[in-house]
Image (cartoon, rainbow, N blue to C red):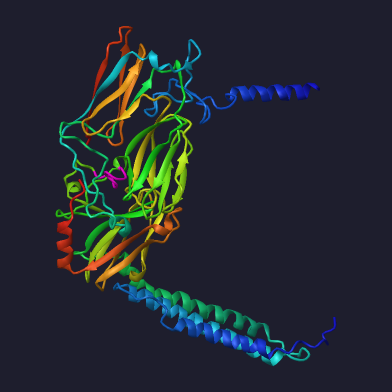
Amino acid sequence: MRPTRLAALSLSLLLVSACGGGESGPAGPSAAVAASNSSDSGDGGAGPQAPSTPTAAPRPWDPTAGIAKVSGQVSFAGDTPRRRKVDMGSDAECSGLHAEKPLDESAVVGAGGGLANVFVWVRKGLDAWVFTPPTEAVVINQQGCVYIPHVLGAQVGQPVEVRNADPITHNVHGYSKKNTGFNQTQAPGSNAITREFKRSEVFVTLKCDIHGWMNTYLGVVEHPFFTVTDEDGSFDLGTLPPGDYQIAARHEVFGLQKQDITIGADGAAQTLEFGFTEED
Amino acid sequence: MSTSGAAPRSPAFGLLFYALGILVVAGFAVGWLPEVSSAHGHGIDRVIRYLLLTTGTLFLVGCLVLGRFILTYGRGAPQEGAVLSERTQLLWAIVPVLLMCAISEVGVLVMALPVFGEVYGEPAEDAFEVEVVGKQFEWLVRYPGPDGVLGEVDHDKVHDSRNPLGLVKSDPAARDDIVLRGQLHLPVGRMSIVSLRSLDVIHSFTVPLFRTKQDTLPGYTAFTQFTPEKEGTFELACAELCGLGHYRMQGTVTVQSEEELAQWLSEQEPWL
C-alpha cells in the first residue's frame, strides 16, 4: 500500500473512532439496555450520550438485588386547578361522541391534595445494570377523541402501540428531542401504530394534528423503575439495591423535580415527598 | 427563399378563435362568484367584475382580430402587404400599452382604493374586537370577556390543552378572556376587527364569503376588519399551505344578532 493510501486509511479510522464508532447509546430495540448517567437536561436522565465512568462492566439486572423500597407522595400546593371540559367545538364528529365532554387531564389534583399524572422515575444511579425491555407492548388508545392514558411510561426498546378506537381519523404525531419523531395518519379500523424508542426521554409527546386538544405524554427510560401517579399522588418505585440515586418527578405543566437519595446496606425504605405548585 | 408554397386553408382554425373568445368572456360574465356576505365584499366583487369585463373585452377583440386575420390571410400564397411607417408601428405599440395601463392600473386603483380603505382604514369606534390565532392545524379564537380588553399572553406558557394561547394568569385582563377552538362568533351589521397571530408557521385567515384574507405571521400581529351583512354560518379556512394538516384547518364563523351574540358570550366560561 502506498503511503498516501495508508495515511488516508489511518485518517478514516481516526475519524470513525472520534465520532464514537457508531451509536454510543442504548442498543437496538431487541437488545438489552444499559442505564447510564446523563446530562442534567431534565428529560430522561440516563441518556445515550453521557459518558459515564463505570468501574465495572454493567451486568444484567438481578431482581433479588433490590432490598430497599422507594415510595412517596406527590402533592400540589395552592388553589386546586380548575379542570375544564375539553373544548371539541372545532370538530362536530368528536363532539358528537360525548353527551358530556371529558375533563382536561393536564392538571388533576385529588381531594387529598395528591397530584395525578406525574411521571416518577429513577433518573440516575442504575448505571451498573443492564435491563432487558419487556416484549409486551404498552398500549395508548384514542377513544372519544382523547388519548388514554394521558401519561404513561415505557422502557427503551419496549413496543408502544397506538390504537384508534374511534370512528374518526386521527393523526398520531410523535414529538421527540432524542428519538426519531413520526407523523402518521390513522383511519378508523386501521392497524395499530407500533413504535420503539431507542433513547431515554421524559417526555416523548404524542399529539393529534387533526384535533388540537389531543395529547399524551410518554416517559421512556431504560429500566422498569418508573410509575405514574393517580389522584392520591402516591407512588411506589419498587425495591432498589444499595447505592446513590436520583429520583425525579415530572409533570407536563408544573415541571421537573429531583431528589438524591442513598440506600444503605441495611435496606431501610426511602419515603420521598414531592411538592408542586402553579406559577403565574 | 421561396415563399410559393400554399399555406393550409384554415377557416376552422379562425372560427375556433371566435368561439374561444366568445365562450371565455360569456363564461366569466355569468354570476360565478359565490355569495357575498360582508359590506366591503361588494366592492371586491366589483373590482373582479371590472377586471373580467375589461380584460375579457380585450381578449375577445384580440381573438376576433386574430380569427379575422387567419380567415383572410391564412389561405393561398402569402400576400404582399403594405409596410407601415415607423411612426405608425410605434403608435400601434404604445397606444395599446397606455390603454391597458389606464384600464388595468388606473381603473383598478380608482375602484379598489375605497375598498382598501374599508379593510385597512380606521376601524369604527364600536367595532367588535376579537383575536384569531393560527396554529397547526386549527384556529383559536379569543374574546376579551366583560372587560372588553384582551389580556397579556406569554408564548412560554402555551400548553396545547391547558393554556393553548399562553394567557398570563397574573394579568387581570386575561382572567376573563374566553378561548374557543374554531368558533368565531360575530355580530351582524357591525364592524368586526380581528387581530391575527400565529403560534408556529405562516397561516392565512380567510372567510371566502366575506371576501377577506389576511396572512398570520409568527411574531407579528396583523389586523383585518369587515362588517358581516347576513346572519348565518360561514366557513373559516386557512389559505396558506401550512403543513400536512392544512386542509383540515377550518373553523366556523357564526354571524348573529347583537342580542344572540351577547347571550352566547355570557354562556362561555373564561379560560383561566
- Is residue B58 depicted above or below B119 in this figure? below
x and y percentages locating residue B196 in the rendered image: 32, 56
x and y percentages locating residue A56 in the rendered image: 49, 11
Q: Nearer the viewer, residue A187 or A278?
A: A187
x and y percentages locating residue B108 in the rendered image: 42, 75
What secondary structure characterizes most of the magenta part?
A: loop
- Which residue range is magenta in the image? B158-167
Which residue in the rendered view is the most extreme toward the top?
A265
Q: Residue at x 57, y 24 (%)?
A: A20
Q: Is residue B166 magenta?
A: yes
Please give left or right for residue B217 compared with residue A273 in the image: right
Q: Nearer the viewer, residue A263 or B203?
A: A263
Q: Residue at x 29, y 47 (%)?
A: B165
Q: Residue at x 29, y 40 (%)?
A: B157
- Is residue B58 depicted above or below B124 in this figure? below
Q: Quadrant of the N terminus of chain B?
A: bottom right
x and y percentages locating residue A70 in the rendered image: 29, 19
Please give left or right for residue A86 compared with residue A20 in the image: left
Q: Is residue A163 magenta?
A: no
Please give left or right for residue A85 compared with residue B204 in the image: left
Q: Residue at x 29, y 64 (%)?
A: B253
Determine if residue A175 is in view.
Answer: no
- Is residue A188 depicted above or below B104 in this figure? above
> Residue B206's image quarter?
bottom left
Which residue in the rendered view is the most extreme toward the right?
B1
Q: Quadrant of the C terminus of chain B?
A: top left
Determine if residue B175 is in view.
Answer: yes
Q: Nearer the viewer, residue B17 or B250?
A: B250
- Is residue B42 depicted above or below B120 in this figure? below
Query: Number of marks in the image?
Result: 0
